[in-house]
Each structure stands twice: as C-alpha cells, then as structure tokens.
Amino acid sequence: MKDVLEGFGLNRDTMDHALELDAILQAWRRRVQKRELGQMALRELGVPVDLPKLDVMIAIWAPSNEFSEDREGETMVATIAARLGIDPSRASRLVTELIAEGYAERAVSQQDARRTIVTLTGKGRAVVTAVRTIKFLILGSFLSDWSEEELATLTPLLHRLSHWQDEIGSHASDRYAREVATLREELARQLAEG
C-alpha cells in the first residue's frame, strides 16, 4: 500500500503518521461505540434510561460545548434529529418515550404558535446535569495530570482533526478522481482474476 500511495505523491513519513493515526482512531472508535463512560454514569446513578434517550435529552438541552453553532431558537423534534444525525421518525419516537417517562415535555413555541417544541422537565435536567457532571469529573481528573502546554497543543489539534472531512469536503472525490480511478481499475482486474 505504501508503494501505491507513494506513487500518488504522498511521502513515506506522512503515510507512517496516517497509518498510526488511523490505528489510534479505529481503537478509539471501538471504545467510543461502547459508550463506556455514559453507561457507567447511568448505571452508577441508577437512572433507568438507555443511551439513545440520554442522547436525545442532551440534544434537547443543547450544551454550548457540543452544539454551539446550533443553540439559537427553540428545540423541535427536527432540531433533535439534526443535532444527533438520526432519522426524524426515530427522534420523534424517542421524544415520545421521554415524555411518557417524565423526562421531557412538549410546549407551544413562543415564536410561532403553530409549532410544537420539546423541553426537558426538571427530572430530565437533573439526569443530564448529573451524567455530565460525572463525565467531566472523570475527564477532568484524567486531564489534571497533563501540563498546560500539552492541553494547549492537544485541544486545537484534536478540534482540527475532528473537522478533517469538512476541510476536504465533497471535493475529495474530485480531487482524487485519477487515483480512485486507478485503484478501481486495479481492483476490478484483481477481482476478475479471482
């Protein structure tokens, strides 16, 4: 693979870093998918809510560190779906369940009386606050051993990395059309040969 990538103009040092970074991100993805911290927080708090419902409650509350660009206005089911990147029908079902369990409620929009908005009840806000407090207690404790320099380096670089696809954008297929065509042709040849 390195020979192919080098043929496309990437240098070996960059490839080595990309491969190492990919391995780190794949391991991180697997751990994040388990949602260990969120599950632990719900379990330790004794809250009978699953992670998808917790996600919806957090999307309703919309903490600024997660949804800074999307905090204006009122929260509707469509807003929740967009914030979480889920289907609106799934968001609606989860909201309905949270309402039935007393964690959320529907209200009439103050901006447009024809719209229905979703808000957290006191019970819902208490759960979100407690779970996020545990999360930041543990994360803060872990980071407390890091130097200010390490944190000042990590945070902006991690932010930049988390937006790498936005930087490349939908132009990636255009930018690498020749390389992708070459790989497609080679793959087709190899698959045909069996």
Image (cartoon, rainbow, N blue to C red):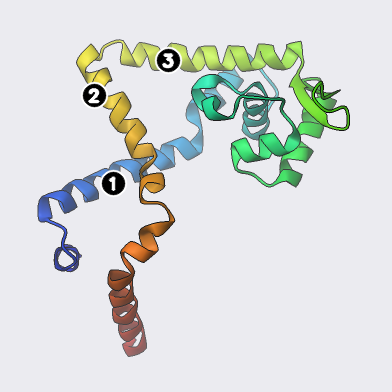
Near mark 3 (Cα within 10 A), the count class, few <14, some 14-19 or many ≥20, is: few
Indicate whether 19 appears above or below 68: below
Instruction: Give the residue displayed 27% in from the left and 26% down from the top.
Output: 154
- Which residue position is annotated with label 1? 23
Q: Quadrant of the N terminus?
A: bottom left
- Which residue position is annotated with label 2? 153
Q: CA distance from mark 1 to mark 2?
A: 21 Å
Near mark 2 (Cα within 10 A), the count class, few <14, some 14-19 or many ≥20, is: few
Please state which of the two labelled residues, at mark 1 or mark 2, is closer to the viewer.
Answer: 2
Residue 15: x, y in percent?
18, 53
Instruction: Give the residue displayed 60% in from the left and 12% down from the top.
Output: 129
Which element type, helix, strand or loop, lies under badge 3? helix
Which element type, helix, strand or loop, lies under badge 1? helix
Q: Earlier in the sequence, mark 2 or mark 3?
A: 3
Residue 167: x, y in percent?
36, 46
Query: Would you identify the image quadrant in which residue 101 lies?
Result: top right
Indicate whether 89 appears above or below 112: below
Instruction: Give the residue displayed 35% in from the left and 44% down from the top.
Output: 164
Q: CA distance from mark 2 to mark 3?
A: 21 Å
Query: Would you identify the image quadrant in which residue 130 lies?
Result: top right
Q: CA distance from mark 1 to mark 3?
A: 25 Å
Q: Residue furthest right?
A: 114
Closer to us: 144 or 36: 144
**Amino acid under disc 1:** Ala
- Which residue position is annotated with label 3? 138
